[in-house]
Image: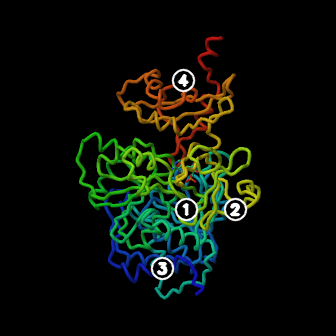
Amino acid sequence: MNYPLTLAHFLERARLLFPSVEIVSRKPDKTLHRETYADFYRRARALAEALTKAGMKPGDRVATLSWNHWVHLECYFGITCAGGVLHTLNLRLHPDEIAYIASHASDRFLIVDDVLLPLYDKFKDKVKFDKVVVVPLSGAPPKGSTSYEDFIATAKGDWQYPAIAETDGCAMCYTSGTTGKPKGVVYSHRGMVLHALASCMPDMFGLSQDDCVMPVVPMFHANAWGIPYSAVLTGAKIVFPGPHLDAESLLDLCEREQISFSGGVPTVWLAILQNLESGQRKWKLHPKFRSVVGGSAAPPSLIERFDKFGMKVLHAWGMTEMSPLGTISHVKPHLAAQGEKVAYEYRAKQGTQAPYVEMRVVTPDGKIAPWDGKTMGELEVRGPWIAASYFNQPDAGDKWSADGWFKTGDVCTIDPEGYMQITDRSKDVIKSGGEWISSVDLENAIMGHPAVAEAAVIAVPHPKWDERPLACVVKKPGAAVSAADIRKFLEGKFAKWQLPDEVVFVDAIPRTSTGKFQKLTLREQFKDFRWAEERKAG
Ligand code: AMP
């Protein structure tokens, strides 16, 4: 049968099979809001009806400016199942940038958390929404505004799903690019459905109705890695952390609700690890707790240190342009049989491709690299949930190859077993004397030093070698370590010419709005750095 792959099926499945399953959200005042899938179903459909009555037409963009919570989940389904396009705005961006993005996407409606109204106030004069709906998370919304609760209360409940083609858009996100203007990516129902089905497979996220799922990754970043859709598809219990993303609050939720699956960027997990290792408090966590870590490279030491607490870290890689899931690292049984050391080596890689994602590595001279684990090149991908273009951005065509592959901008190797390993962003790779040095490998190694909190390695111009690596290191509070100690620690782990020539200590590594190292800012900061030999020469 020619049966359309649309998200309405997920919503109906939730009503039929999982009505009593809970959705728990932490509110700004730290109290917990609890509802069931039955409530979620009714309210998501009420939102769909209210938006349709308010004049939303198929394909219209509806923006959200929200933390992770139950209303945002209703938006994920209510907007999309009514034929609208859910546009999640990144609340960590500068107000001018949010205004640019909302205008570029021609968002017609905005659904905004009351606690984020001060942010909205900073850009509201720059964007014209037809209607703004305020989510009352912390009391009644301001006078004169439309409350989300009043808005959905207008629904009669007799609303019918519109005819939606599986290729119709259902959601969009803008990339948090560190250069140039942000670019929009539109996801289709078909892409989202296939992404959710694939992500639930045992060798991917392995989600099931036995799970209690907590997406720490924001719902405004790359569809929260598709976790809201995958969780509803399987009927898993869902726990949303709201705005409280510190280690203590997250661990408290993990213990209280017995979270078995989570996902977030390495920064979040590093903070959690520090809390666990401090031993301040013993947390009673789910015995099979696992978490997907991605968005930037998970240091191998992070994976090993979590194992000591019986918590399994799964390393994954993806991009906004890929819905976002590309690869995940599960160790094949015959590799695991070779012992712990080998298993850790594979777990630290970004992993093997998801079903229906294809990968190839293209070397600087345009050749397709062999899967030998050594030859570096730019990673190109294609598949049913990978963007074929940017929204309204005709000049961005150079991101796709002539034969239709998406150029990721990530530099990597793929080994004979199919495990991909990112060595850099193409703009971050260090080009020294015609050879490439991976900044990520060096950072991972430095972050394995017990006195180091975090480290970023950047390319700095060099008179002889073109570029050389400079390590920018943040010490752990109270720790003492010298530049010479760090260099000594790296010796033997790398070829001599790959070692950072110098180490500088900094207070913090600048980060992007999604928690990644902002190396562009660091490179700016150190662009006039003079190496020891230059300083000596005067
Ligand atoms: P975004 O579109 O904001 O999700 O960023 C995507 C980019 O994040 C990728 O192109 C990579 O450069 C980086 N990234 C995501 N996951 C990983 C990972 N596991 N290891 C290294 N880099 C990653």
Q: Check disc 3 and report the residue beneath it.
A: 45
All told, the count of numbered labels is: 4
**Callout in the foreground (1, 4):** 4
Circle 1 sits on which residue?
88
Q: For the residue marked with disc 2, what is the amino acid?
A: Ser
Examine the image and state in which quarter residue 267 appears.
top left
Cα–Cα gap, marks 1 and 2: 19 Å
Does label 2 or label 4 sit earlier along the sequence?
2
Q: Residue at x 52, y 66 (%)?
A: 111
Q: What element does badge 1 sit on?
A: strand
Give the Cα distance between marks 1 and 3.
19 Å
* Label 4 Cα neighbours within 10 Å, binned few <14 / some 14-19 / many ≥20: some
Identify the amino acid type marked 3: Arg
At mark 4, the secondary structure is strand
User: Horizontal and vertical percent for residue 144?
Assistant: 51, 67
Mark sitting earlier along the chain (1/2): 1
Q: Secondary structure at mark 3?
A: helix
Give the mark nearer the N terminus: 3 vs 2. Answer: 3
Whole-percent x and y of residue 393? 73, 59
Earlier-in-chain disc, 4 versus 3: 3
Report the side of 108 relative to 74 (left or right). Answer: right
Which amino acid type is marked by label 1? Thr
Name the residue carrying label 4: 502
Q: Quadrant of the C terminus?
A: top right
Mark 1 and mark 4 lie on one chain; the one further toward the N terminus is 1
Q: How packed is label 3: few (under 14 Cα within 10 Å), some, or many (20 or more)?
A: many
Q: In the rendered image, which residue does mark 2 sit on?
A: 389
Marks 3 and 2 in Cβ contact (< 8 Å) = no
Kindly report the distance in space between the C-alpha atoms of the residues bearing marks 3 and 2: 31 Å
User: What is the secondary structure assignment of the residue under circle 2?
Assistant: loop
- Residue at the spot x=49%, y=60% of the render? 224
Mark 4 vs mark 3, CA separation in Å: 59 Å
